[in-house]
C-alpha cells in the first residue's frame, strides 16, 4: 500500500517533465514586460500546450524531456496577433471575384468579364478590392461601367476599404433603387455607387451566404492567416451569422486561430447577446462591440474638423450626433462589452475621445476603450488618450498605402498627428497593431517594416514619411504581440512566451532584428504553432498563401 503510494507520487512528480517538449537550438526573440527585446535559445513546452519557460545559454542543459525538436538555429517569435481584421471577409475575398490591385477601370472590367465567363452559374457576382486611387482615371466606377460588361445578372463590387460598393443596373433593380432614391444620413449615392450608410439600400438584397459557404470562407481565412504567422485576431464587425460560423468551427475542432470577437452593435442589440469569457480552450471569445464614428478617407467619408483640401465643400461624413454616439457606447458598456470604435478623421476621433472620457469616469479605467484606425488626429487630442485608458488600434500598412492620398485630402499643413505612432507611445497611451485585412494583406511583416521605417516595401519614400513617427523594432513587435493581446483582454493568455501562457509561436526565415526594413518586409513564415501544435509548415504546404505578396 505504502509502496504503491510512493510509486504513484513519484510518477506524478515525474510526469510533467516526462511529457515536456523542448524546442532546441533556436534564435528566440520576444518583447519583455518592460518593452525590451529578450533573446532565448530554447523553449520548453508542457503537454498542455502551454509554455513552461524559455531558456538561455547553458540553462537546463540536463533537462529531462520527452521530446526534443531541433530548431536548426532558426528565428522563433511569439505568434503575431492582428488587433483588427475581418476574418470572414478575408475568406470570402479569396473565394470570390478578387479585384485587389486592379490597375485601371479597364482592368476591373476585364477581371469582371473573365469571372462572369468562368462562373456562369453564379446568380450574383460579388467582388471585392478595387481602389480607384490606383487607377489613372482616379474616378469611382459607375453602374454603366459594369453594365458594359455584365448586364444579365446582378453585380456588386466592394471598394477595398469596405466603405463603398458599386452595383450594376440589374442589382439596382433587384434592390428597388431608382434615380429618385435618396441617400440616408451618413451616406451618399452616385451613379450606382453607394457610400457608407447608403450601403443599407443595396446590401439587404444580396443573397445571404449559406452555412457551407461561410464554413469554407472561415477555413480559407485561417489557412491564409496561419501561413502569415498570425495566431490571434481581433475579429471586427462580426455578425451573428459570423459568430455562429466561429462556434460551428470550434465545436468541431476546426477553429485554430484565436479570435477576440467584436460584434456589430446592431447584431449585439437585436440578439441580446452578451460578452462571453474565453471558450474552447481560449480559442474564441465575444469581448466587445464595434461602433463607427465616420467613414474612410478614400471615399472622403472621414469626418474632418476642417474641409477637405481637395474638395472644400465637404468635411466628410459624421455618422452620429454626440448624444447618439454616447448612447450607443453607453448601452454596450452597460452590459459589459468592450467598445471598439472606428474613427479616421480628426473630428471623429475627438468625438469618440470625449465619449470615452465620460464613460471612463462612469465605468472605471480598465475597460480598455479602443479607437480603431486613429489615422488623422488633431495633435492636441493625443494626450487625452492615456488618462482615459484609451487604446490606439492602428494599422501601419494604412500609412504606406494612404500617404499620397492623405497629402491630397488634407494638404501639407494638417499632416502632423496622422498615423502618429511614436507620438501616441510618447503620450503614454497603449498601441495595438494590425492590418484591417482584407483592406490590406494580413501579412504582418510589411507592417512591422513600415512601423520602423515609414517606408513601403520598396523603400518609398526615401528617408521615410514623417520619419519622427518611426518606431524601434521592439516597439513595433510589442504592438503586434503584447499590445494586441492587451487590446483584446488576452495578455494573460498570449502575446509573449512566458510560463503559463499558450505556446503560440512561429519560425521565420531570417532574424528581424538585424534585417533592414525592406528585408523585414519580405520575411517568410516557415512554421506556425498554436498551443504547442504545429498548424502550418511551409515545406509541407502545397500552396503558400497567395494574398498580399
Ligand atoms: Zn476594419
Image: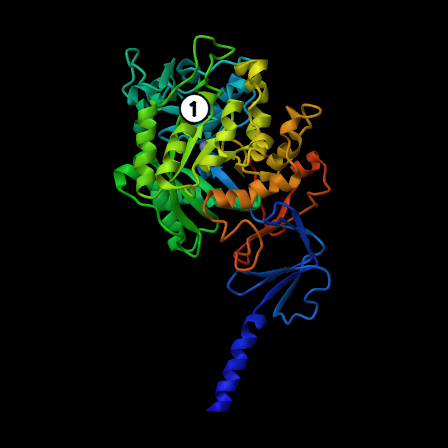
Q: Which quarter is ligand 1 in?
A: top left
Q: Within 8 Å: ligand 1 and the Cβ of disc 1?
A: no
Location of residue 213 with respect to 416 vertically, above or below: below
Is 476 on the left or on the right of 375, as rendered? Answer: right
- Does residue 441 sit above or below 379 in this rendering? below
Residue nearer the viewer, 271 or 385: 385
Q: Position of residue 422 (x, y in %)?
A: 60, 32
Image spot of residue 105 (x, y percent): 51, 17
Quarter of the image for residue 443 reads: top right
Q: Residue at x 30, y 19 (%)?
A: 173
Which residue matches tag 1? 348
Coloring applied to the structure: rainbow
Residue 387 appears in the figure: yes
Q: Position of residue 332 (x, y in %)?
A: 32, 38
Residue 158 visible within the image? no
Residue at left offset 57%, top offset 35%: 425
Q: Quadrant of the C terminus?
A: top right
- Graded by Cα atoms within 10 Å as few (under 14), some (14 to 19) or many (20 or more), the crowding at tag 1 reads many
The answer to which quarter of the image holds residue 295 is top left
Numbered label tally: 1
* Residue at position x 47%, y 8% in the image: 312
Task: Provide the secondary structure element on which disc 1 rests.
Answer: helix
- Left or right, 537 with respect to 241, comes to right
Amino acid at each position: 500500500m505504502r509502496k504503491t503510494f510512493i510509486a504513484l507520487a513519484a510518477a506524478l512528480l515525474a510526469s510533467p517533465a516526462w511529457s515536456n517538449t523542448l524546442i532546441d537550438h533556436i534564435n528566440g526573440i520576444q518583447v519583455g514586460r518592460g518593452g525590451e527585446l529578450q533573446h532565448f535559445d530554447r523553449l520548453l513546452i508542457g503537454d498542455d500546450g502551454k509554455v513552461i519557460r524559455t531558456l538561455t545559454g547553458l540553462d537546463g542543459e540536463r533537462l529531462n524531456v520527452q521530446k526534443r525538436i531541433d530548431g536548426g538555429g532558426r528565428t522563433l517569435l511569439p505568434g503575431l496577433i492582428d488587433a483588427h481584421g475581418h476574418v470572414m471577409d478575408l475568406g470570402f475575398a479569396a473565394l470570390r471575384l478578387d479585384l485587389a490591385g486592379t490597375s485601371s477601370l479597364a482592368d476591373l472590367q476585364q477581371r469582371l468579364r473573365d469571372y462572369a465567363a468562368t462562373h456562369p452559374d453564379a446568380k450574383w457576382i460579388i467582388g471585392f478590392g478595387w481602389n480607384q486611387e490606383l487607377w489613372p482615371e482616379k474616378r469611382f466606377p459607375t453602374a454603366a461601367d459594369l453594365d458594359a460588361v455584365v448586364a444579365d445578372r446582378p453585380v456588386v463590387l466592394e471598394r477595398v476599404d469596405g466603405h463603398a460598393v458599386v452595383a450594376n443596373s440589374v442589382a439596382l433593380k433587384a434592390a428597388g433603387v431608382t434615380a429618385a432614391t435618396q441617400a440616408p444620413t451618413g451616406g451618399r449615392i452616385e451613379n450606382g455607387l453607394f457610400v457608407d450608410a447608403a450601403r443599407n439600400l443595396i446590401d439587404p438584397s444580396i443573397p445571404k451566404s449559406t452555412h457551407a459557404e461561410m464554413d469554407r470562407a472561415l477555413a480559407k481565412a485561417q489557412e491564409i492567416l496561419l501561413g502569415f504567422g498570425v495566431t490571434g485576431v481581433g475579429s471586427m464587425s462580426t455578425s451573428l451569422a459570423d459568430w455562429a460560423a466561429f462556434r460551428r468551427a470550434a465545436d468541431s475542432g476546426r477553429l485554430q486561430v484565436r479570435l477576440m470577437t467584436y460584434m456589430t452593435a446592431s447584431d449585439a442589440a437585436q440578439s441580446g447577446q452578451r460578452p462571453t469569457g474565453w471558450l474552447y480552450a481560449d480559442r474564441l471569445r465575444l469581448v466587445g462591440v464595434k461602433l463607427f464614428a465616420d467613414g474612410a478617407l478614400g471615399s472622403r467619408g472621414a469626418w474632418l474638423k476642417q474641409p477637405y483640401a481637395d474638395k472644400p465643400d465637404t468635411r466628410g461624413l459624421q455618422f452620429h450626433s454626440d448624444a447618439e454616439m454616447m448612447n450607443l457606447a453607453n448601452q454596450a458598456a452597460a452590459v459589459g462589452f468592450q467598445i471598439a470604435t472606428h474613427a479616421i478623421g480628426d473630428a471623429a476621433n475627438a468625438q469618440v475621445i470625449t465619449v470615452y472620457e465620460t464613460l471612463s469616469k462612469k465605468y472605471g479605467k480598465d475597460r480598455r476603450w479602443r479607437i480603431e484606425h486613429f489615422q488623422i488626429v488633431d495633435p492636441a487630442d493625443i494626450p487625452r488618450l492615456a488618462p482615459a485608458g484609451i487604446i490606439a488600434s492602428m494599422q501601419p500598412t494604412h500609412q504606406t498605402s494612404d500617404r499620397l492620398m492623405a497629402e491630397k485630402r488634407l494638404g501639407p499643413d494638417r499632416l502632423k498627428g496622422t498615423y502618429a505612432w511614436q507620438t501616441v507611445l510618447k503620450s503614454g497611451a497603449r498601441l495595438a497593431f494590425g492590418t484591417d485585412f482584407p483592406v490590406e494583406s494580413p501579412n504582418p511583416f510589411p507592417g512591422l517594416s513600415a512601423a520602423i521605417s515609414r517606408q513601403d516595401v520598396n523603400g518609398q519614400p526615401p528617408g521615410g514619411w514623417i520619419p519622427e513617427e518611426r518606431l524601434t523594432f521592439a516597439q513595433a513587435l510589442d504592438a503586434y504581440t503584447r499590445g494586441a493581446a492587451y487590446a483584446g483582454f488576452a495578455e494573460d493568455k498570449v502575446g509573449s512566451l512566458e510560463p503559463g501562457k499558450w505556446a503560440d509561436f512561429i519560425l521565420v526565415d531570417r532574424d528581424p532584428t538585424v534585417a533592414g526594413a525592406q528585408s523585414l518586409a519580405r520575411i517568410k513564415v516557415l512554421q506556425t504553432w498554436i498551443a504547442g501544435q504545429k498548424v502550418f509548415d511551409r515545406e509541407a504546404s502545397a500552396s503558400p498563401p497567395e494574398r498580399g505578396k
